[in-house]
Image (spheres, rainbow, N blue to C red):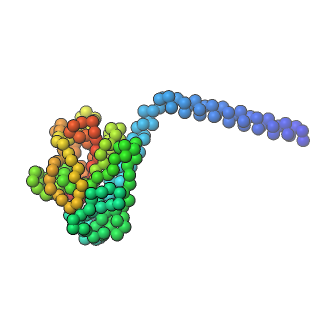
Amino acid sequence: MIVQKNSENGSVLILIFVAIVLFAALSFTVGNMMRGGDTGSIGDEKGALNAGEVIDYGRKLRQAVQSIRISNSCTDTDISFNNATIAGYAHTPVVSDKCKVFHTDGGAMLLVPSPAEINGGTDWAFGGRLEVDDVGTDCGAGTTCTELYAVLEDIKLPVCSAINDKLGITTPSGAPPQQNDAVSFTKFIGDYTWQEDIEDSAGDDVLKGKLAGCTETSAGGSYFFYQVLIVR
């Protein structure tokens, strides 16, 4: 019996020793990562996850808008983004709740705040005054055939680049395309008056026909994601 106890004690000591060695190896690996040994791969992976989150939410918004158009017979001008969080989206005259993207009787979407690591926490915006080249009818200045879209401004560059990678949008330089002209994001309350096109200044046409993408403002240094919700 004494020999058996000594054997058991020895086994326990071996297990403890192995656990200490494994813990030390893990601590060394994590330490290297924290010191920058693998920060590039970690950053790329995080950027890809954030990009997927932005793209997925944009697609869900598009699906919600399409659903209320078909199921609730809402016209293009009736679509409403009125919500209890962000002011300025109330239609005049007031539209039915069934045409509101963020109402339970309408699209039943939740207005999800953007994490600070994606764009510093800037809210999603919704507009109808921009035209995407080769999406729907290209009419130009002074017309009303612009798209309905969602926009997320101030996207951080690594996230913007990851978004375009996922969407298959590439430029010769590898950087996000830059806008040809200044773009403003007037809140949508039923107005489709043209303000500007979404097109890249380099003439590479990488955004032509794209329902979604991430692009740099004409002033440079700031990036935004757009998702077309209704092609017009």
Q: Is residue 214 visible?
A: no
Q: How many marks?
A: 0
Relative to 102, residue 203 above or below: above
Relative to 155, residue 138 above or below: below
For the C terminus, the image quarter is bottom left
Q: Residue at x 22, y 60 (%)?
A: 189
Q: Splitting the image into 4 quarters, where does residue 180 fall? A: top left
Give left or right: position of 6 versus 171.
right
Give left or right: position of 152 versus 128.
right
Q: Residue at x 47, y 32 (%)?
A: 38
Q: Is residue 80 visible?
A: yes
Q: Residue furthest right?
A: 1
Q: Position of residue 202 (x, y in %)?
A: 18, 37
Q: Residue at x 42, y 40 (%)?
A: 45
For the N terminus, the image quarter is top right
Q: Position of residue 129 (x, y in %)?
A: 18, 53
Q: Residue at x 33, y 38 (%)?
A: 157
Q: Position of residue 192 (x, y in %)?
A: 17, 58
Q: Residue furthest left?
A: 142
Q: Residue furthest front?
A: 87
